[in-house]
Image: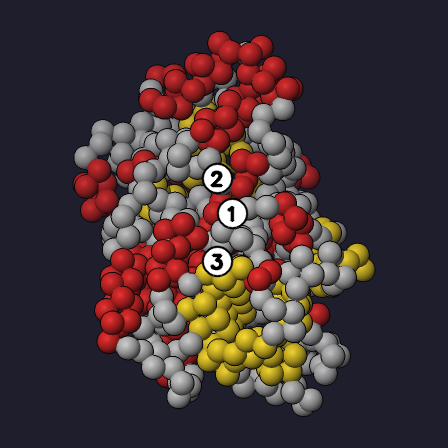
């Protein structure tokens, strides 16, 4: 059921077996996976069922490192979390991502890919991906499309890797009714965790202090707690909870907030003619059919040349798409789409908070002819109208303890410290991108396709001005068996605390070149199975026969949700 936390009596004490903080992909997955377990679950969500700016502003912070998105922009604070603005890219991590690699300091997961493999199939179902087959030849055969073919790359140098697309699944919409009908789950909306209160020896969590922007305050007690609030907010909550642990909970060794990772994205012009590059598989041409491909470095190349996991897309560019009018028109189309009009990023800067501005309308009208042509080409993607190509590199980032999230001096509406993000990379990060592009260019030349535009001399060492991330805040509460090197253990439990767990990409020791959401869901499923074993059921929890059938029906709906319509842009 859903409960507006603003209606809770001030000073109330809410009790549960399990308290989950954050209703994004991880939190909702945990709640629905355990809905039939007999565990009494309290799910706390800072936002409401829809977006509002007052709550969103709680995410605002300061960037002091590499250029990054405004922190109040790249995290979404209402039911469904960042899936409310998710692009839907999915791929499981590669086996090499779990390995301890001698050339990547601080690499290695506590367990191998076989541990997570059983959870990926269900993660695909929850993300509404109809297939978990990533074999390029079989995927291309199923497409039966003339322009959807695999490039004949030298397998000793490069390989084609398949990515699949979620609808994209908005967890807060698709699983809303299942959460509402789950008798064992109480989801409190507008409920902000202000502090995690631990025992005097900081070995267990006693309760959470919760507040609403309206002024209501109450506490939540539970036998076990899970932080599922994302890479930056999980860190903030641990650091703010410093009344009995001066450095913050789980931070005896100053690891909380360190190893912040993203996926550095850069773009580079590819000089090629459309007839030479006849395959559209490596861009977004088949997004509507749920697949795309990237050119990637094989594991043997990564090991031989001591590089990170790297992949790249090739995007077609059409006339008119470089105009400001095109960006404004695209925003208008997205805002009118039934499947995308509620996406927060449409309302965020740089697009504006309240629809199109007069300047944006003017841009559309002044260049209506070019905007119309660009829209037509975007819809039908005729090969002979392509005006150019871009190679977009998307690389793994090596773990770096100096890349970190810390508390800052400014305060939010609750009087709590905001955060400061210092995103830093290492030389191996840029070197992996440069070398990956060199290998790709060599193969494109060999195949007679084209070549990359030269880099400016300074870009061989420093990042180009078009560097950006993917809204992937990972690594800040990393997993490691040694508490001196990680925040959580192999099961996601915070070192030194008997009943506090973390479910998020923040526990990733390394980030792969694949987007994190699918693996976040798989990890949440694994954690749910662990919690099912360790959480002691409260004697007062009794599931009546009628309720059992309701829960079973809810679980069935979760596993086979109806596919939502795919966006056209």
Q: Which residue is mark 1?
A: 50
Q: Report the disc number at residue 569.
A: none
Circle 3: element type: loop
Q: Quadrant of the C terminus?
A: top left
Give the secondary structure at mark 2.
loop
- Identity of the residue drawn at 44% across and 58% down: 25
Q: Position of residue 428 (x, y in %)?
A: 58, 56
- Residue 497 at what x, y percent from top left? 58, 84
Q: Which residue, given by chain and number where applicable, does mark 2 sit on?
A: 342
Q: Describe residue 91's horizontal placement relative to residue 26 as left or right.
A: left
What crowding class fits label 3: few (fewer than 14 Cα within 10 Å), some (14-19), or many (20 or more)?
Answer: many
Q: Tell me which label, 2 or 1, sits earlier in the chain.
A: 1
Q: Is residue 155 left or right of residue 74?
A: left
Q: CA distance from mark 1 to mark 3?
A: 13 Å
Q: How is the image coloured?
A: secondary structure
In this view, the mark in front (2 or 1): 1
The residue lying furthest to the right in this view is 409
Q: Residue 214, percent across and down?
A: 67, 57
Dot 2 alpha-carbon crowd within 10 angstroms: few under 14, some 14 to 19, many 20 or more: some
Mark whose residue sits in front, 3 or 2: 2
For residue 78, above or below residue 367: below
* Foreground label between 1 and 3: 1
């Amino acid at each position: 059921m859903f409960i507006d936390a603003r209606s809770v009596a001030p000073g109330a004490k809410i009790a549960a077996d399990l308290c989950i903080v954050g209703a994004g992909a991880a939190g909702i997955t945990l709640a629905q996976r355990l809905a039939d377990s007999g565990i009494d679950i309290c799910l706390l969500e800072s936002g409401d069922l829809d977006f509002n700016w007052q709550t969103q502003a709680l995410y605002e912070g300061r960037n002091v490192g590499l250029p990054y998105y405004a922190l109040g922009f790249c995290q979404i604070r209402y039911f469904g979390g960042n899936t409310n603005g998710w692009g839907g890219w999915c791929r499981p991590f590669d086996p090499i991502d779990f390995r301890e690699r001698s050339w990547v300091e601080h690499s290695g997961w506590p367990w191998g890919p076989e541990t997570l493999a059983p959870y990926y199939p269900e993660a695909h179902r929850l993300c509404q991906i109809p297939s978990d087959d990533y074999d390029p030849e079989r995927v291309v055969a199923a497409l039966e499309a003339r322009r959807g073919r695999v490039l004949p790359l030298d397998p000793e140098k490069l390989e084609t890797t398949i990515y699949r697309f979620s609808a994209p699944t908005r967890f807060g919409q698709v699983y809303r009714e299942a959460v509402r009908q789950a008798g064992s789950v109480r989801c409190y909306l507008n409920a902000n965790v202000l502090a995690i209160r631990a025992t005097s020896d900081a070995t267990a969590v006693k309760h959470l202090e919760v507040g609403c922007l309206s002024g209501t305050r109450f506490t939540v007690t539970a036998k076990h707690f899970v932080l599922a609030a994302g890479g930056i907010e999980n860190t903030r909550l641990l650091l703010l909870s410093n009344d009995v642990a001066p450095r913050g909970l789980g931070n005896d060794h100053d690891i909380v907030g360190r190893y912040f990772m993203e996926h550095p994205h850069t773009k580079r012009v590819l000089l090629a003619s459309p007839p030479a590059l006849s395959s559209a598989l490596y861009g977004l041409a088949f997004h509507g059919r749920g697949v795309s491909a990237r050119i990637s470095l094989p594991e043997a190349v990564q090991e031989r040349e001591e590089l990170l996991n790297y992949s790249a897309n090739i995007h077609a560019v059409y006339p008119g798409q470089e105009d400001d009018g095109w960006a404004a028109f695209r925003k208008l189309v997205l805002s009118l789409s039934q499947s995308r009009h509620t996406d927060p990023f449409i309302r965020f800067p740089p697009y504006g908070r309240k629809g199109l501005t007069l300047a944006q309308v003017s841009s559309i009208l002044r260049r209506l002819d070019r905007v119309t042509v660009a829209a037509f080409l975007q819809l039908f993607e005729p090969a002979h109208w392509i005006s150019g190509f871009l190679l977009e590199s998307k690389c793994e980032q090596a773990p770096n303890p100096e890349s970190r999230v810390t508390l800052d001096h400014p305060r939010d509406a609750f009087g709590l410290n905001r955060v400061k993000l210092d995103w830093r990379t290492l030389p191996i990060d840029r070197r992996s991108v440069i070398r990956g592009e060199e290998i790709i260019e060599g193969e494109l030349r060999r195949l007679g396709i084209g070549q990359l535009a030269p880099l400016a001399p300074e870009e061989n060492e420093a990042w180009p001005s078009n560097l950006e991330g993917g809204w992937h805040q990972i690594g800040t509460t990393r997993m490691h068996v040694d508490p001196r090197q990680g925040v959580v253990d192999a099961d996601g439990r915070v070192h030194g605390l008997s009943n506090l767990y973390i479910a998020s990409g923040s526990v990733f020791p390394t980030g792969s070149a694949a987007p994190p959401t699918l693996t976040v869901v798989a990890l949440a499923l694994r954690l749910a199975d662990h919690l099912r074993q360790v959480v002691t059921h409260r004697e007062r929890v009794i599931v009546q026969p009628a309720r059992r059938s309701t829960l079973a029906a809810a679980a069935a709906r979760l596993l086979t949700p109806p596919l939502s319509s795919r966006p056209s842009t």
